[in-house]
Each structure stands twice: as C-alpha cells, then as structure tokens.
Amino acid sequence: MPCSVPESLPLAETLRAQGVHTLLVQFTDLEGVAKGKLVPLQQLATVLQAGAGFAGPSITGTGLPRCGPRSEFYARADATTALPLPWWPGVARLVGDGFVDGQPFEACPRQVLRRQVARLAERGWRLETGMEPEFFLLQRAPWRPADAHDGLDKPSYDLKALPRQAAFLQGLAAALADCGFEVLQIDHEDAHGQYELNFLHDDVLATADRLMLFKLAAQALAEREGLVFSMMPKPFADQPGSGLHVHASLWRGEETMPQVLPAFVAGVLAHAAGLTALAAPTVNSYRRLAATRALSGTTWAPGLVAHGPNNRTALVRTLGDRFEWRLPDSSANPYLVSAGLIAAGLDGIERGLVPPPAVDHDLYEQPAPAGTARLPRTLEESCDALAADTVLTAALGPTLSAEFLRLKRAEHAEWSAQVSAWELDRYAERF
C-alpha cells in the first residue's frame, strides 16, 4: 500500500518549501533515453523505499517477462538527486535506480555504473569525469539547421550566429545553474546549427545524472523556442558530427593519481574496439567515425587507436593528471560509456598494461605508427568486438550485454535493408 509522507521528513519539507507538489521519478533505458512518471509529493516515502513501478517489458533493453514477479521494474529514487526543475514549476526530479523482485536490477544502466564505481571504491579510488555534450538545433521537414543564416565554411566560435540562439542558450545555462551546475562555457561548434555547453566535472555517477538532466532541460527549452534539440551524432554528411568527449581523472581522497593513468589509458586503448559499440551506439555514429573530411576542414572524430599529449586527432588526448576520451558521441548512454571506461581502465591497471608510444603529430595528415589499429567502421563490426570482449560484457552483465547486442544488431540489419536517395540518384538510370 502507498505510504503517506511523514510531516517530519526533511526532504519532503524542503521540497514543499520550494513549491514542489509533484515528483518526476526518472530513469534511463538501455539506449540512453530518459523515462519516468509523475508522482505526487505525498508519495515521496514510497518512491524512496520501494520505487515508482513500471511494466518491465515496456522498457527498452530490460529483457523482462510479461508476467510474474520479474515483470515489474521499480525505479527506486535516490534522495541525493532531488532537484526542483526551473522550467517545470512545481516539479522536482529524482533519479531512480532499477530494482526487480526486490533486488538491484543488473541490467539497469545506472546499476551497471554503480557496480564499476564500487570496484574503484574497494581500492579507495574514485573517478571524476566531465562530459562535453555537443548538439544541434534543427528544424523539421526538411531537416535543416534552425538558423538559416548559419552558413560559414568554418563556423566554430561564430559570434554572429551565437546571439541568434541566445534565448535558448542563455535560458538553458540559467536553468542548469539553478539546478546546481557550474556552467563553464557555451560556444558555436564546427558544423552549421551545432553548439556545445560545458559544465564542471564531478564524480562519475553524478556527471552521468547531470548529463541526463541537461538533456531533459535542453529538450524542453528547445521546444518552447520552436526548435528541435538533437544529439544525433551526424545529421549532415558534409559537416562534423557531435561528440560527447569525456575528461577523466583518478582520485584517492583529495589528490589525483597521475601515476596510474598510463596503465588506465592502456586499458582503454586495449578495449577500444569493444568500447566503440557503447560509445558509438547507432548506425549514424559511424558517419562521424568513418568520415575523412568535412566542410570545415576536419571531422574532429578519432579513427585510430592512438594517444598523444594534447592531440585532438587521437582517440585519447593526454593532459597531465587527466585525459580526454574522444570516442563517445552524443547518442551514447552516459552510464554505459562510463561503466565501460572504468572496466577497461581497471583491466589495464590490473594487468599492468603499458600504452604504445605517444603520437604527437596530426593523424588526419600524417600516417599513424606501424601497427596502429583502426576503430570499427560499422555498428555491426563494433558489436562483434563487444561480444568478444569478456571484460566489457562482464561489466555490463549477461542480460544487458545480450539485450544491447540483440537490439543493435537488429538496428544495423534494418539500416542495411534501406535504399537511400544517394543510391537511387547514382544507380537508377546508370545501367
């Protein structure tokens, strides 16, 4: 039976004092999409103790049955994540962890990340990450940049285009600041209609939660402006795509641990092929990774398994006591890419791996060192690599691994069966 909220419950009192009357209990599905439901504030105790209930098989990637005790998925709210939403007066978001039949659900992406965070904690370590979301503002029918005047060959940092989207961009920054984000910068990126908003790094789980809140805010505020907020990796063939670059540092207490980063990076490089499935999880992702040129002159996407000091053409850009992992794109599930990153890095440390020699030249212009591996070129190829990577599949767990591979292989097969406009234009009358 639902519980009423005791009037002495501090969180309930705090939220009520902030004008909150409704809770948004939100979780993230396998594909990185926010899901949830609205619950009256009076049910706070219930969602904290048991969770908000959902039909398990209706959620992408759970693999749960249609009947029996394991058909119910509960998003058990994490009280530390409670935040009123500035763009939705009276509503506060709480992030939910997946539970099934009273136990943590091993295929919940947030639970997957929690398991990897626990492995770090066993060593007295933690990972801090900063995710840099790039995104497009679009108009529908036909799909095009929202700003019709945004047409420079090299549009990065364009201060003519940026003010034209000031209502959305500044509104988004203000909303995030009200949610406790420390917004660092906003800029126009290297494609038409493409922008980036960066916020301060944090504990890896908190950063993943914040990335999902960023998406919720951006989607809602873009709709108010008549725009489409898009984290599609590469909507325009001749322009760069959107990355979700991850800056990562290892910590023990209040000190960073640069001495173990080489082995951690070596693990990330060793598992690069399997990680690609998690970091580039759509067929469109490979338009970004496989591109060789763009209107602006560069794609900014990695193609080779290499690392180098402050080298933005490499897979891993090393920066002293941290590194930037440039593989993920904006369609990636932040919990799964973070879990995969930890699992790969810890494997490198546990096996004492040593990274190959650093590359300090432009990999877009000059050949890579002999023996440098190339990233998978298709979703099918990266799925095969993930399936063969026992470290990563163990980190994901058997249910999520199987569901991820099943869904992504089906996506690749469906895409492969399509006939594109390019094919018709090229071949319909040729022969």
Image (cartoon, rainbow, N blue to C red):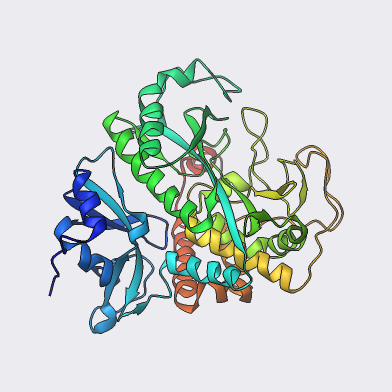
Looking at the image, residue 90 lies above or below residue 94: above
Where residue 113 appears, as percent x and y from the top left, is 50, 65
What residue is shown at x 58% (from left), y 54% (from top)? Answer: 128
Residue 245 visible to the viewer: yes
In this picture, is 62 found above or below 281?
Answer: below
Tell me which corner region of the image, top left, top right, bottom left or bottom right, holds residue 69: bottom left
Q: Which quadrant of the view contains residue 382?
A: bottom right
Asked if residue 318 lies left or right of residue 119, the reply is right
Residue at image position (16%, 64%) is 6
Q: Which quarter of the figure is the C terminus placed in?
A: top right
Q: Quadrant of residue 85?
A: top left
Q: Nearer the viewer, residue 299 or 236?
A: 299
Q: Nearer the viewer, residue 186 or 117?
A: 117
Give the residue displayed 56% in from the left and 56% down from the top.
279
Residue 399 percent location from the top left of the image: 44, 77
Residue at 41% of width from left, 22% of height from top? 147
Image coordinates for residue 182, horizontal then vertical, percent: 48, 38
Q: Quadrant of the N terminus?
A: bottom left
Q: Work out whether residue 315 can be spotted.
A: no
In screen coordinates, is 326 left or right of 189? Answer: right
122 and 117: which one is in front? 122
